[in-house]
């Protein structure tokens, strides 16, 4: 392995798998690290080290100091963090451990995957990267991402570890078999089960996995142009979640019932991303429409998920 190696934490997750596939296609050397094997791609799995990032014993398992760490690993579910705040504590511990790995092994570049949750409920505002405030923390998950951003910034100031904070929004598509909205609704459509939508007015940018992986690749390739800054990697368009559900039903030709309930504690009701910085510095724009992304997602699930 060369000194150009990329270390990807959370390499078996949805974004991690897609990003590692991007690295493979670009012939960029990488090491993956995750708690579980990669079930979707044998080539990625062969490069994956199994470890618990909440501990530090994995530091010596990495065979070569990478040029850069892309930290994607996290407990990603907002409401789950409300039910069990320890998940948010775990996220913060993982960030600190990754930063400590960088400090001890003299890795001077880090990309940190944050979230649109750090913007909180901003109503009709289109959020720029500078609009994050502590008082916007709607959930322990959001707090863990704000804390992660703070620690990343502190380690740059204290130890010279340059960073890019990447804020994703509602990534969907291949490799996701969790209970997130889209895979959950696909499963319920197939079983003709009722669907619950938490928040009739809830409206967010849904970003297709291919766009997300490409945006992350652009950050990696243009690290110096955007270092020590944050950037939104998200669709510029918002969609109500109830409309996403209806679109899934239309494309799958199902008619199971939709029940509208109140938003759950901790969840953001509306968010729209200002993506001009990504366009300006990275030449990046999420181009997959929700209609096309849903079509591709359904095709993948029909082929890969029983």
Image (cartoon, rainbow, N blue to C red):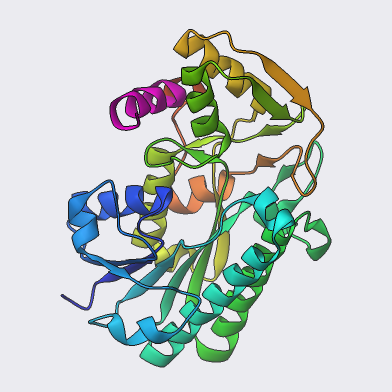
* Picture residue at 71% right of the left edge, 40% below the top: 271
Question: Which sits in the foreground, 97 or 104?
Answer: 97
Q: Answer whether residue 299 is magenta in the image.
A: yes
Report if residue 213 is visible in the image. yes
* Picture residue at 84% right of the left edge, 61% below the top: 135
Question: Which sits in the foreground, 208 or 49?
Answer: 49
Q: How many marks?
A: 0
Q: Answer whether residue 49 is magenta in the image.
A: no
Question: Which sits in the foreground, 81 or 222?
Answer: 81
Residue 61 spot, x, y in % from top left: 29, 82
> In the rendered view, does 117 fall on the left or right side of 47?
right
Report if residue 26 is visible in the image. no
Look at the picture and state if 41 lies above or below 238.
Answer: below
Look at the picture and state if 138 lies above or below 103.
Answer: above
Residue 214 spot, x, y in % from top left: 37, 46
> In the rendered view, does 91 fall on the left or right side of 304?
right
Look at the picture and state if 45 lies above or below 51.
Answer: above
In the image, which residues are magenta?
Answer: 293-306
> In the rendered view, does 223 fall on the left or right side of 147?
left
Magenta: predominant secondary structure element?
Answer: helix
Residue 37 spot, x, y in % from top left: 30, 59
Q: Quadrant of the N terminus?
A: bottom left
Look at the picture and state if 139 lies above or below 164.
Answer: above
Q: Quadrant of the C terminus?
A: top left
* Picture residue at 41% right of the left edge, 82% below the top: 108
Residue 54 spot, x, y in % from top left: 51, 76
In terms of image quadrants, where is residue 132? bottom right
């Amino acid at each position: 392995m060369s000194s150009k190696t990329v270390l990807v934490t959370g390499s078996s997750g949805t974004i991690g798998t897609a990003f590692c596939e991007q690295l493979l296609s670009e012939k960029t050397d990488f090491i993956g690290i995750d708690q579980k094997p990669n079930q979707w791609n044998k080539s990625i799995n062969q490069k994956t080290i199994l470890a618990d990032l909440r501990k530090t014993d994995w530091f010596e398992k990495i065979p070569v100091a990478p040029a850069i760490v892309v930290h994607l690993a996290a407990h990603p579910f907002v409401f789950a963090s409300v039910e069990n705040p320890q998940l948010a504590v775990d996220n913060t511990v993982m960030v600190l451990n990754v930063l400590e790995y960088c400090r001890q092994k003299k890795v001077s570049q880090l990309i940190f995957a944050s979230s649109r949750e750090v913007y909180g409920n901003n109503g009709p505002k289109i959020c720029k990267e500078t609009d994050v405030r502590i008082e916007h923390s709607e959930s322990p998950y959001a707090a863990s991402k704000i804390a992660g951003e703070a620690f990343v910034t502190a380690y740059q100031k204290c130890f010279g570890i340059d960073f890019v904070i990447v804020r994703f929004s509602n990534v969907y598509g291949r490799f996701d078999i969790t209970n997130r909205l889209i895979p959950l609704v696909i499963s319920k459509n197939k079983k003709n089960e009722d669907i619950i939508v938490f928040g009739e007015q809830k409206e967010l940018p849904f970003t297709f996995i291919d766009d997300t992986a490409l945006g992350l690749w652009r950050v990696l390739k243009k690290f110096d142009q955007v270092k020590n800054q944050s950037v939104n990697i998200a669709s510029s368009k918002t969609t109500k979640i109830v409309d996403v559900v209806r679109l899934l039903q239309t494309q799958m030709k199902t008619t199971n019932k939709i029940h509208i309930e109140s938003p759950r504690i901790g969840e953001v009701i509306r968010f729209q991303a200002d993506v001009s910085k990504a366009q300006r510095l990275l030449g990046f724009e999420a181009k997959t429409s929700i209609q096309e992304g849903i079509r591709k997602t359904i095709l993948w699930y029909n082929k890969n998920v029983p």
